[in-house]
Amino acid sequence: MVDKELLEILACPACKSEVELREDRIACTKCGRRYPIRDGIPVMLIDEAEKPE
């Protein structure tokens, strides 16, 4: 999974808010976008994010 120290410095590229680990994705605490994790590396690209429902 993703290291806690890395999670502390990551921010949502769309709205610049904090993110947290939810299941197998990195999720923005403000806008709700969910970013995939591939081979243990967060893919923090807006085009790769799942938008909230």
Image (cartoon, helix red, strand yellow):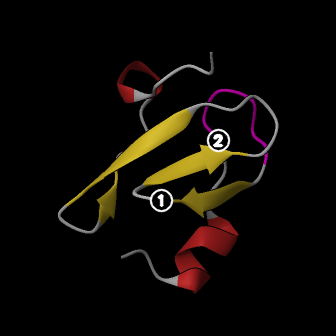
The answer to whether residue 16 is magenta is: yes
Q: Report the residue at 69% width, 32% height from top.
A: 32
Q: Which residue is mark 2?
A: 12
In the picture shown, does residue 8 fall above or below 21?
Answer: below
Label 1 neighbour load within 10 Å: few <14, some 14-19, many 20+: few
Check if mark 2's residue and mark 1's residue have beta carbons within 8 Å.
no
Is 21 left or right of 48, judged from the image as shown? right
Q: Position of residue 8 (x, y in %)?
A: 68, 73
Q: Tell me the number on the disc at residue 32.
A: none
In the picture shown, does residue 7 fall above or below 44?
Answer: below
Q: Earlier in the sequence, mark 2 or mark 1?
A: 2
Is 53 left or right of 41, judged from the image as shown? right
Q: Position of residue 31 (x, y in %)?
A: 75, 28
Q: How many marks?
A: 2
Residue bounds of the magenta highlight:
12-17
Q: Report the residue at 75% width, 39% height from top.
A: 16
- The image quadrant of residue 47 is top left
Q: Secondary structure at mark 1?
A: loop
In the picture shown, does residue 7 fall above or below 34?
Answer: below
Q: Which residue is mark 1?
A: 23
Distance between the alpha carbons at the discs numbered 2 and 1: 17 Å
Q: Please, what is the three-letter code of the amino acid marked with disc 1?
A: Glu
Single out the mark in the foreground, 2 or 1. 1
Q: Please, what is the three-letter code of the amino acid marked with disc 2?
A: Cys
